[in-house]
Amino acid sequence: MKEAKAELKRWTRIALCDDIPLREGRAVKVGNREIAIFNLGDRFLAVDNRCPHKSGPLADGIVSGAAVICPLHAWKMSLETGEGVNSASASSCVETFRTRVEHGVIFLEIGAPATPSEGKAAEDLPLLCTEPGTIAEGEATCSHA
Amino acid sequence: MAGVACVEQILRHSPKFAITIFGDETHVNYNRILLSSVLAGEKASDDIVLNGLDWYRQNGIDLRLGVRVAGVDSQAKTVTGDDGSVTSFDKLLLATGSVPLIPSIEEVKKEGVFVFRNLDDTRALLERCRRGIKAVVIGGGLLGLEAARGLQVQGCDVTVVHLMDTLMERQLDPTGGGYLASKMNQMGITVLLGLSTTAILGNGKVEGVQFKGGGSIPADLVVIAAGIRPNVGLGHEAGLEVKRGIVVNDYMETSHPDIFAVGECVQHNGICYGLVAPLIEQGKVLAATITGNKGPKYQGSVQAAKLKIMGVDVFSAGEIGDKLDGSEVIRYEDPALGIYRKLTLNGGKLVGVILVGDTADSHRYMDWLRTAKDLVPLRRQLLFPAPTEDTGIDIAQMADSETVCGCMGVTKGTVIQAIHDKGVNTLAQLKECTRASTGCGSCSGLCQSLLKAVVPEFEEEVKRTICKCIAVAEDQLREILRSQQLKSVQEVLEIYGNGIGCEVCKPALSYMLDMLWCGDHDEDRSARFINDRVHANIQKDGTFSVVPRIRGGVTSPDELRRIADVADKYRVPMVKITGSQRIDLLGVKKSDLPKVWADLGMPSGQAYTKGVRMVKTCVGTEFCRFGVQDSTRAGIEMERRFENLFTPHKVKMGAVGCPRNCAEATVKDIGMIGQEGSWQVVVGGAAGKKVRKADLLITAETTEAALVAAALFFQYYRESANYLERTYDFVERVGIEKVRKETVYAQDAAKQGLLERLRKSKERSSDAWLERYSPHHPSQFVQIQPLEEVLV
């Protein structure tokens, strides 16, 4: 069983960089769940597509820096840490997923949630899908997770 | 500027003089510092006038505009004008300013080569500017950079050529200059450093500039802003002691007992000043001397300079080099934000400051410089002040002697005195009375805080900003976008905002750009709310509602059948008659939207956007026994004329055929109320969060006249309301009288302008649901499938 679980948490080819317009998000159905992937220009960030408030589709929100504002009731969630970052959303959080880009393809690490000890800060890892061949990662953790 | 400012001071001391003022320009005195704002379209030339003709008349001043003084006879005590007039004087005040320094460049006198010194130069430049032409500014100092930005705003493709390796090298160190250069580059202005211009190329008309070493670049227009030199001709003429400028002592006396000089034309203690604050200080001293109150001495000024380019904050004062013996330098840099701060201290006192990217603290540093404040106890708060309750400076802690307005040299004490003694309680009165905030204007916030603190009934001039991302007031921002031809949300955010934006300002900016450029802008869907990305109204479960346009609420059996078929085919969970005489299909999946629209074959009803919703109508004369006007047809026509357009907030309209008002036109944003032989056009009604009866705009005799009146109001609201301001708030804020004056009772040209801009917008607009055929982005409606199977 343990091995089967480790098998689940792997890098998955999820979408093309071109699928997601600059500063917008798109939902991708992965198994039973929807993941919202955002194009921040210098990296892609991914979170669960359900706002912790009323399950609003975060992928449809307006991007503000490295945060998204849920289209339903304007909860603002950090795409880097998953934490709520405005007064309404404070102390709530959404699951985040690591991403990486290779040859114009976005990879998503999907499975068990990443733990804080594992990764480097996302800022250290700039990535550009416009430069074929570059490999970089966007990664995030939520301290509440 | 310096001369008249001094005359103002003289009048304050004593009214005994009969004053004659000669000026070779044909304009009354204006604020020269703001010429760059005129070039950048931020101000009109009338806005920068300092003293109108009335002021001269009231003070009995004989003003001779357009007369150049050609000669001074210091023995006979007369001046001769170039119009041949001879005027005698008891005291003569020279305030001849400076003239542009023209470097030795070959063939400099060509058509298309300008200087940038006075209002006429500015007007000539404005006339010459065309979109897309290549402009080269020679000189990367304050004036050159401001000219460059102005030209760019006017649409020119601008290059700044600077002789030195650092921009504004007299005010900045190389690092600060580097930050400034990268900001200018970011704004789209090319900066070439360390280049000496040797010749202007072209046959009669400028075609390019050539540099030492042989390189050259093309140019259709050249502005020389390489510095200024004191205009000392009359000093020589009068036999005064002249070095670089007319030499004056601490009392501002020249070498002749009855001749005085002030401003950029003088040299005091070896220094010629070219910035406004010292000139105002000199004027005060001179006024005392000339009126027989000799006593105050001019002891030189701390040189301080502020670059006046919106979005490019640069401030410098005092020593800029690191050379001073025993000086300590404290630096802070944030390359990502473009912020650079450098303080130079000597013996525990501030001797120089450079701020690039954020100049909010310039007042604090200027005060430390001027008062030579002991900074030892403040060591930990040099770069960042200890937080105070108020943002900016804590005005209660300011000493009375502290300067509020650096340009005009007005202290806090002077402001407070004016408030107490002269009953000043508005910013306008304060400006008039003390001259504070009439220079570069950067202290207006501080003046307002002072007024607020001291005058209990003071009402702040409300600066309504959209949100925290952009500090510029919304109405001012609209003007800036228009005059500076900004066409993308991100560009606006980068130049005037925090570069990031939020869910409040992004849709607001999207609206402004669409309204101003009628669709000829960069439509950035990432700045739009989801409803405007997929043209449907998002529901609590993430599905969407679809409301097709049913103009005037009039449909047909065929349309109803199609709607029913769509509801069946896509298993629409709810079909509802709306409050607006339309049909709503609720619970449609995003990916089904294009198919639903295609099957409906009806245009978008815009029920999801801040835009034109619908016109609710009654059956008017067609069937109703009481109807006196054909409200159904008029309503449908009104809907056709305005549909597909965006508005600051939603616009719901109504048309009724008689005063029984069955379709409730009196509580609509725009209503047409039919009566015998005429229509009443009413605006600003509401039956939502607020209930408000609409105000009468006009009574029109024909349906066409009524529709035109509605169109005038509609476009006026689009252009003048704040984003998310409904017509009922807008009409209440502006007042219906003003609304009438600006619309139906406006000058013909103004009315034509409104209608023409509306026509242009309408012409470029289209049914948003046509994006089903040509989506804005390939994945706009599509559910993205993972590239490989995943087990979760």
Image (cartoon, coloured by chain):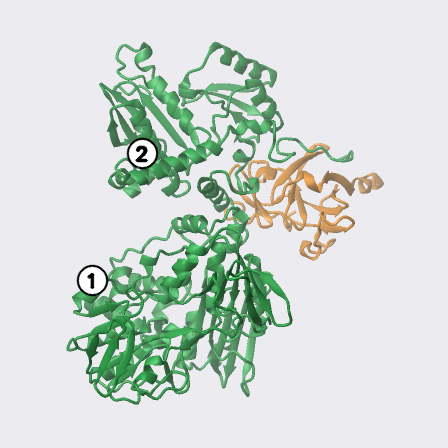
| B195, above or below B664, in the image | below
Q: Name the residue under label 1.
A: B54
- Residue B340: quadrant of the picture: bottom right
Q: Give the Cα distance between marks 1 and 2.
A: 40 Å
Q: What residue type is labelled 2?
A: Gly
Q: The orange chain is which one?
A: A
Which residue occupies 41% across, 40% down? B724
Q: What SS does tag 1 mark?
A: helix
Task: Establish if B557 lies above or below B647.
Answer: above
Give residue A115's position: percent from left, percent from top.
Answer: 71, 50
Frontmost residue, B246 versus B102: B102
Q: In this view, does B745 lie to the left or right of B360?
A: left
Q: Quadrant of residue B460?
A: bottom left
Farthest residue, direction left: B16
- The image's mark for residue B353 is none
For disc 1, the chain is: B
**SS label for mark 2:** loop
**Residue density around tag 2, few if under 14, some if 14–19, many if 20 or more, within 10 Å:** many
Q: The green chain is which one?
A: B
Name the residue located 53 percent from the left edge and 46 percent from the top edge: B488
Residue B130 visible within the image: yes
Q: Where is residue B78 in the image (x, y as percent from the top left)?
A: 22, 81
Tell me: residue B235, above or below residue B556.
below
Which residue lies under the disc numbered 2? B684
Looking at the rendered image, the quarter that the N terminus of chain B falls into is bottom left
Could you tell me which chain the residue with mark 2 belongs to? B
Q: Nearer the viewer, mark 1 or mark 2?
A: 1
The answer to whether residue B570 is left or right of residue B56 is right
Instruction: State the residue in front, B223 or B309.
Output: B223
Q: Which amino acid does label 1 sit on?
A: Asp
Of B259 and B188, which appears nearest the observer?
B259
**Label located before the other in sequence (1 or 2):** 1
